[in-house]
Image (cartoon, grey):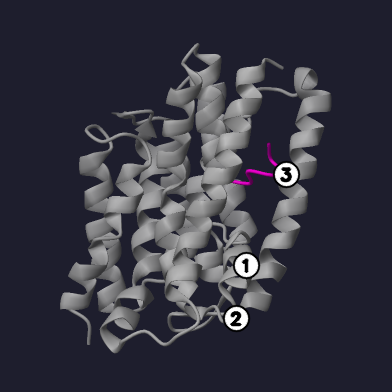
Amino acid sequence: MKPEVWIAIGALTAICFVIKAVGPVALGGRDLPYWAERLIVLMPAALLAALVVVQTFADGKALALDARAAGLAAAAVALALRASVLVVLLVAALTAAGLRALGVG
Amino acid sequence: MSAIVFSGAAQFATLAVLSAGGSVITAIVAATLIASRFLAIGVALGPSMRGSKVRRALEGQAVVDASLILARTGEGRYGVKRLLGSTLPQYVGWTLGTLGGVLAGESIPDPKDLGLDALFPAFFLVLVWSELGDRAARVTAAVATLIAFVLIPIAPPGIPVVAATLAVLAGRAVQR
């Protein structure tokens, strides 16, 4: 591999370490005020909803509507029908794969 | 890279920039932006950690996206044992999977043909679905969705997810 790849890997290792350490170092080890706890309770809903959107509809810096969106829609239907997690994931992958096999998305 | 960076999204961002002929600096900046969501996830899990700063910094390294749900022990509380227990298998799988890809990469079909890229959003959908029990969480998720859609075309990749955490303020406004 070219040396710049190793430079990037080394720098990222350090950066990711710091990024992941900031929250626990700054906020751990003590009790937070009530208002902060109420906000933190809501963090998973915000982060996970945004991750769903980004991983389905983002193509770099552009919005895209492709087979991933169909997979997500199928997963939502499976979830609404109370399917198990593995079934939901399978449905999503098979839907996207099927559409692509047909030349869509 | 999988063994020491251990942030899939950041790794993919680096490789995308480098293989497109971008500079090392561009690659590092892009990956840092993508990884910045762990600032926010660290804010969610950090308050549950005890012990020395060094210990908390090291425990923070085990945090992955799914930790938000898998490591949770109660409302807004997270257990370090659950965190480590849920991340360790993922770390092993991720590292071995990378090794397998390096060794067998040539003979594997395009993951997109298998629909594997649809797995990630579906998995996060499963996780967020379990969150939507109360009104505050539903409002938070809806506003976060909106923020992400608006920011994807205008902000660098990575920023939409971090900015979407502002949705907790909207959720707080309707809480209880």
Residue kind at label 1, given as amino acid type: Glu
Can you identify the residue that label 2 sits on?
Answer: B51
Looking at the rendered structure, the number of numbered marks drawn on it comes to 3
Closer-to-camera residue (B67/B119): B67
Question: Going 57% across and 52% down the picture, which residue do you hit?
Answer: A17
In this view, which residue lies farthest toward the left? B173
Label 1 sits on residue: B59
Q: Is residue B174 left or right of residue A35?
A: left
Identify the amino acid type marked 2.
Answer: Gly
Query: Which residue appears at 57% of the width and 23% of the height?
Result: A101
- Residue A92 in sight: no
Residue B125 x/y as whole percent: 45, 56
- Tell me: residue B117, above or below residue A28: above
Which of pointers 2 and 3 lies earlier in the amino acid sequence? Answer: 3
Q: Quadrant of residue B26?
A: top left
Mark 1, Cα crowd under 10 Å, few <14 / some 14-19 / many 20+, is: many
Q: CA distance from mark 3 to mark 1?
A: 16 Å
Residue identifier under label 3: B3
Question: Both on one chain, marks 1 and 2?
Answer: yes
Report helix, strand or loop for mark 3: loop
Contact? badges 1 and 2 (CB < 8 Å)? yes
Helix, strand or loop for disc 2: loop
Rounded to the nearest angstrom, the CA distance separating label 2 from label 3 is 26 Å
Our reading of the magenta stretch's main secondary structure is: loop
Name which quarter of the figure residue B44 lies in.
bottom left
Q: Which residue is painted at 72% across and 17% down in the image?
A: A1
Q: Chain of mark 1?
A: B
- Distance between the alpha carbons at the discs numbered 1 and 2: 10 Å
Q: Quadrant of the C terminus of chain A?
A: top left
Residue drawn at (42%, 48%) of the image: B36
- The residues colored magenta run B1-7
Same chain for marks 2 and 3?
yes
